[in-house]
Amino acid sequence: MRAVLDRDYQETVGRDHVRRLMSILSLQAIYPGPKTSQPSPNHQVYPYLLRNIVAAYPNHIWGTDITYIRLAHGFCYLCAFLDWHSRFVLGWSLSNTMETSLCLNAWERATEYGHPAINNSDQGSQFTSLDFTQAVLQSGAQISMDGRGRCLDNIFTERLWRSVKYEDIYPKQYQTIPEARSGLTDYFQLYNYRRPHQSLNYRTPAEVYFNQPINLNQTKKEPNRLALLTP
């Protein structure tokens, strides 16, 4: 704001003065309010396993994260699991709280497709909780966690959030959780089965994940998962 006043209006003022005037006028910058990754000092943190490793096949590496969605009166939280090789969204869940159950619900939906060799997340308390880490380890997967302050360690999931927010959440401005759930169901269907990705040579995530062409006329509802996984 200070720079714009100086550049466009030739009004030279200090940052503190601008901050005070914004406070008087009840103006506030728009920025993410709630933090979605709060560590717990009592939980075990696992090392990052993916340095110099490229996802080479479906279910090699999954990434997961939590983001928030601003509603008319408050927020809700979205957790998703993404296959890094294909960019296929395997499972997701919405909740008005950030409890571990949000992540476990998304994990259970994702594992209907199979299990990863490595599951990567940040060090948030939901992902370091005993309930979540046990579920991952019992599936036979290794646990990988981003370093503190290293958002690029989970870059594919961060790119997913950017697509979800700029292509669906921001334009639609969901008012309630049921409205968001319905809209995101349609969006992830589009994202998985109809939206080609440049990084995938303009194939869809579903075509890469299942390694076969997908009949677009049969994707108004999500196709049977086990049928698609059958060679």
Image: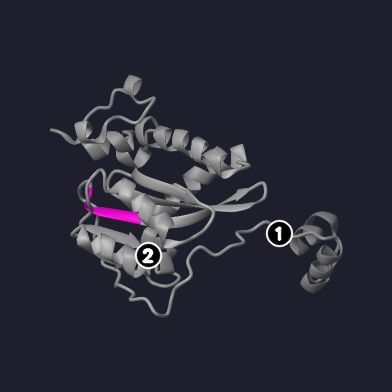
The numbered mark, 1 or 2, whose residue comes first in the sequence reads 1
The image's colour scheme reads: one colour
193 relative to 166 in the view: left or right: left
Compared with 177, 55 (above or below) is below
The image quarter in which residue 21 lies: bottom right
Residue at image position (71%, 59%) is 29
Q: Kindly tell me whether residue 164 is visible in this rendering.
A: yes
Give the quadrant of residue 196.
top left
What residue would you read off at disc 2?
127
Range covered by the magenta-colored residues: 59-63
Q: Which of 222 and 117 is in front in this view?
A: 222
Give the residue displayed 25% in from the left and 43% down from the top: 113
Q: Nearer the viewer, residue 202 or 111?
A: 111
Secondary structure at numbered mark 1: loop
Q: Name the residue under label 1.
A: 29
The answer to whether any part of residue 51 appears in the image is no
Q: Are marks 1 and 2 in contact (CB under 8 Å)?
A: no
Query: Could you tell me which residue is drawn at 48 percent across and 70 percent down?
Result: 38
Farthest residue in the left direction?
231
Distance (Cα) linking label 1 and label 2: 30 Å
Q: Give the residue type at disc 2.
A: Phe
Q: Residue at x 30, y 69 (%)?
A: 48
